[in-house]
Image: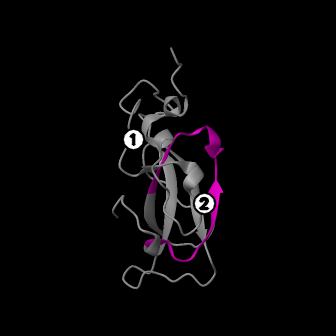
Amino acid sequence: MSSMLQDSQLTGEEEVVWLEEPDHLDYVRQALDKVSTRRGKPRYSRDGRLVGYTTLAADAERDPDSGLFARRTFFLLPHDRDSDPTGDYQVGAPGEAVDPSTIEPGKVGAKTPRSQKGRTAQIAPAGP
């Protein structure tokens, strides 16, 4: 599915579950995955690590074509800023990356100066 999500794709989300404390992460990648369950930790088959996921309400509907549920997962890859602070994403972030502090059920996360430029973007430059 597209990395550019819309709120209308997130109907039925009930809760965001974090497997890692998101406060120390400048960004997380978000994806909409098709899974067989509404709740519980979904299977994760990407490189890197799963850092969070959403659960769905009991009345959340299955996709009529696949019979699966669409649930968001939040993850990081080995070359992301948290693991490689001087690497490719020292400044900037992947297209699907959002600031974890902006994530809530039913709302697509947002890009912020922190997610795009790192914590150095939050520090004001010293005056003359």
| x then y, percent, for residue 3 | 36, 58
- The three-letter amino acid code for the residue at tag 1 is Ala
The answer, for residue 48, to whether it is visible in the render is no
Residue 33 vertical placement versus 112 (above, below): below
Q: Quick one: label 2, few (<14), some, or many (20+) residues within 10 Å?
A: some
Question: Does the magenta run of residues contain 19?
Answer: yes
What is the secondary structure assignment of the residue under circle 1?
loop
Which residue is label 1 attached to? 93
Label 2 or label 1, whichever comes before in sequence order? 2
Give residue 4's mark. none
Residue visible at 39% across and 27% down?
87
Q: Quadrant of the N terminus?
A: bottom left
Question: Does the magenta run of residues contain 2?
Answer: no
| x then y, percent, for residue 124 | 53, 28
Residue visible at 60% across and 85% down?
59
Q: Nearer the viewer, residue 89 or 117?
A: 117
Residue visible at 56% across and 81% down?
60
Residue visible at 44% across and 35% down?
117
